[in-house]
């Protein structure tokens, strides 16, 4: 059994949660700021809808072997989001429903051998097509939080947090990083995982969801603690360094070519 059915089920559940939130938003809600600088909630929903279309491009590339870029250009992507941001609430909801349904159908109908095809986003490296399910889920999970509409990092499923931390670590720069070590802890303070030798900066520790929130630029460091050498942790977000660059690559460089049994 490969991981694809589990990823499909998880993507479906995450999409349903986002749709429920989107359905609850009024016109005034959509015009209000999101957690992303310069973007309203309408911008966020427009991006999620258009991201579905971009993933359809990559799924088409995998199925046909014909290079089909995810977006025409970054400029065209930004212009399309801006143009759709002020759409009525019902239009946003319909666009996300339709786009998500088309992505789900393309995933369902993809020939098994095509999941190993190499595709590429707006940044390298190329990656096997099965990883598109992870990338689409990332867009939905993070941007659901960015809506600032009642769904927060504490609502992320444990599997989502585990996978995103795994990929975040895989894509961290190894030279000139802002932190030297990341320590993940459980509610009792016990160590769940340790990421050593990341750079010359200090060590930081925190629970997985709080750490993911900080590493992806979605918090100022609430729940993340600086651990100076030889001292007890000091819970002061103001003393934290800037988080290292998040997802400087589209995907980890060492992904298996064929869908694995589990990921990560």
Image (spheres, rainbow, N blue to C red):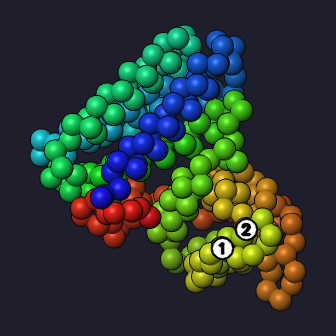
Residue 109: image quadrant is top left
Which quarter of the image is occupied by the N terminus? bottom left
Residue 80 lies, with reference to residue 261, above or below; the image says: above
Q: Nearer the viewer, residue 262 or 18?
A: 262
Query: Is label 1 in a helix, a strand or a loop?
Result: strand
Q: Which residue position is annotated with label 2? A: 186
Name the residue rendered at 75%, 75% in the picture.
Answer: 190
Residue 22 lies, with reference to residue 118, above or below; the image says: above
Q: Nearer the viewer, residue 18 or 248?
A: 18
Q: Are marks 1 and 2 in contact (CB under 8 Å)?
A: yes
Q: Nearer the viewer, residue 101 or 148?
A: 101
Query: Is label 2 in a helix, a strand or a loop?
Result: loop
Q: In the visual, does 55 lie left or right of 67? A: right
Q: In the visual, does 242 lie left or right of 76? A: right
Q: CA distance from mark 1 to mark 2?
A: 6 Å
Q: Residue furthest bottom?
A: 230
Q: Which mark is residue 192?
A: 1
Residue 1 lies, with reference to residue 90, above or below; the image says: below
Question: Can the viewer see residue 233?
Answer: yes
């Amino acid at each position: 059994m490969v991981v694809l059915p589990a990823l499909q089920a998880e993507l479906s559940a995450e999409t349903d949660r986002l749709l429920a939130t989107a359905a609850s938003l009024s016109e005034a809600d959509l015009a209000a700021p999101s957690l992303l600088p310069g973007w309203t909630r309408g911008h966020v929903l427009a991006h999620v809808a258009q991201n579905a279309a971009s993933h359809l491009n990559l799924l088409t590339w995998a199925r046909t072997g014909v290079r089909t870029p995810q977006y025409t250009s970054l400029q065209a992507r930004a212009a399309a989001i801006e143009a759709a941001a002020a759409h009525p609430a019902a239009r946003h909801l319909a666009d996300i429903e339709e786009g998500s349904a088309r992505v789900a159908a393309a995933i369902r109908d993809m020939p098994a051998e095509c999941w190993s095809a190499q595709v590429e986003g707006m940044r390298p490296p190329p990656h096997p097509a099965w990883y598109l399910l992870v990338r689409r889920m990332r867009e939905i999970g993070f941007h659901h939080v960015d809506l600032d509409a009642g769904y927060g990092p504490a609502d992320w499923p444990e599997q989502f947090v585990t996978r995103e931390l795994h990929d975040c670590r895989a894509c961290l720069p190894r030279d000139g990083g802002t932190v030297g070590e990341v320590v993940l802890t459980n509610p009792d303070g016990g160590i769940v995982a340790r990421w050593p030798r990341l750079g010359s900066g200090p060590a930081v520790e925190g629970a997985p969801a709080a750490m993911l929130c900080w590493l992806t630029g979605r918090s100022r460091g609430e729940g993340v603690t600086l651990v100076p050498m030889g001292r007890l942790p000091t819970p002061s977000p103001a003393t934290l360094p800037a988080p290292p660059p998040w997802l400087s690559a589209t995907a980890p460089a060492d992904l298996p070519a064929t869908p694995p049994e589990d990921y990560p």
